Amino acid sequence: MNNEAIEKAKEHFGNILEKQLQRVENMKKGEEWIDYKSLDKIIIGIVGGDGIGPYIAKEAQSILEFLLKEELENGKIEFKVIEGLTIENRAAQMKAIPDDVLEEIKKCHVVLKGPTTTPRKGDPWPNIESANVAMRKALDLFANIRPIKVPKEDVDWIFFRENTEDTYVLGSEGINVTDDLAIDFKVITTQGTDRIARLAFEYAKKNGINRVTIVTKANVVKTTDGKFLKIGYDIAKEYPEIQCDDWYIDIMTAKLIDPKRRTGFKVVILPNLYGDILTDEAAEFQGGVGTAGSANIGKRYSMFEAIHGSAPRMVKEGRAQYADPSSMIRAGAMLLRHIGLEERARNLEMALDICGQLEKKLSITGRPGGATGKELSDYIMDTLKDPELEKRWQSYQ
Ligand code: IPM
Ligand code: MG
C-alpha cells in the first residue's frame, strides 16, 4: 500500500523536476527587456478583478485617463478593458486564468489589475490556483516591487520580492502522499535569484542607495534559502559601493517595529513567501495594505496591482463604494514610472501623500461616515491640478 503511494509520489515529483528544469533553461536564454520608447503605442490593460476590485480599478483608471489625456488622444497609449477575470468565470472554466482572458492580457504591454479572489479550502469556490500567482507565472513577472514610505517617520523602504519561485511556484502541486502525509515544495534557482537580486542592486545603484538587505531563513532552510543568500552576496560583490547585509525573516519582522533599527533598512530582497508576509507588515506603517501598490515586473510584461485582497465582505455588506482606491492609484503611479513617465508618476505620488497622509482632508474608513473611494479620487485629482503641488508637498517635509 505504502509502496504504491511512494511510487505515485515519485512520479509526480519527477514531472515537477522536468518542468522546473525546463523553466531554468528558459531563464538561461536571457530574454531582452522590452523598450517602451521603441513602441508606436503602449497598450495598458485594465482588469477589474473581484469584490472591491472593479470599484477601485475604476478610480485608478480615471486618474490615469486624466494624466495621460494627451497620449490617449494622439494614440500613443491605448487602454484595453479586459473582462472575465472574475471568480465566477474562473470557477465555471476551472482555470486560474481563462485562456481567452490570458490571450487578451498578452495583447497588452502593461496591466493594471484589481484584486482577485483566491479560493481556499472550505470556500464555495473550487480550489483553483490564485489568479495572481498564475499570472505572475504565465507572464514571468519575476520581480514584485513594493515601496513603503512614511515620510514623517523617515521610513523609505523598497522590497524586491522574488515572484515566480519559492513555496509559491508549486503551491498547487503539492502531494498528499497518503492520508497522513502532505508534502509541498520550495523551489529556488540560480537564475531566478540572480535576476531579482540584480534588479534590486541596480535599483539601489541608480538611486544612490548605499544599503541592500537580504532576508532569508538560511540557518534552518539550508538548501534553498542558503542558495538565495549565497547568490545575493555573490551579486553584492559586483556593487562594492553598496553595503550588503542579511537578516533572518523572524528577527527582520521584529526589527521593522523597532524605531531605531527600521529607518536603516532601504532596499530589501526576499524570496516569495517571506516577501508576501513582510510587505503586509511594512504596509501597516503607511496606513495599511489599502495604501500600498505593487509592481510585478517581467522582461516583456508588467502588471501593477494593490497588495491586498478583494474584500468580498465589503461588497456583501454594501460597502464597496467606501473601499480605499489608494493602493490601485499608487500602483498606477508605479505603472507610469515603469513606462518612462517619471514626472507624472512623481506628481501622482505627491498627490497621494498629500491626500492620504499629510493633509488628509478626507478620511477613508471603509464604512458609511467615511469618505467614498470616488470622493478620495476626486480629492487626488483636484490636488494633481494644483499648480503649486510640489510646494504644497514640500511644506510638509
Ligand atoms: C499578494 C497577495 C497574493 C500573494 C495572494 C492573493 C495570492 O497576498 O499579492 O501579496 O500571496 O502573493
Ligand atoms: Mg500578500
Image: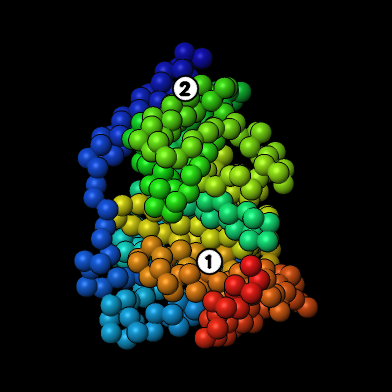
Point 38% across, 38% down: residue:
239
Q: Which mark is residue 213?
A: none
User: Could you tell me residue 329's position as x and y percent?
Assistant: 53, 70
Mark 2 Cβ and ligand 1 under 8 Å apart: no
Seen from the viewer's position, the closer of residues 280 and 263 is 263
Q: Indicate which disc, 2 or 1, sits on the residue closer to the N terminus.
A: 2
Determine the image quadrant of residue 162: top left
Task: Measure the C-alpha gap from mark 2 to mark 1.
Answer: 36 Å
Q: Give the quadrant of residue 73.
A: bottom left
Residue 97: give x, y in percent of width and height: 41, 56
Q: Nearer the viewer, residue 121 or 68?
A: 68
Q: Residue 260: give x, y in percent of width and height.
A: 71, 44
Residue topped by disc 2 = 223
Mark count: 2
**In terms of depth relative to the viewer, which is nearer, 40 or 233?**
233
Question: According to the image, label 1 marks what residue?
Answer: 330
Query: Residue at position x 49%, y 74% from top?
Result: 347
For this rendering, which residue is in front, 36 or 364? 36
Closest to the camera, between mark 2 and mark 1, is 1
* Horizontal arrangement in the rendering, residue 327 relative to residue 33 (left or right): right
Mark 1 Cβ inside 8 Å of ligand 1:
no
- Amino acid type, mark 2: Thr
- Asked whether the viewer can see residue 250, the reply is yes
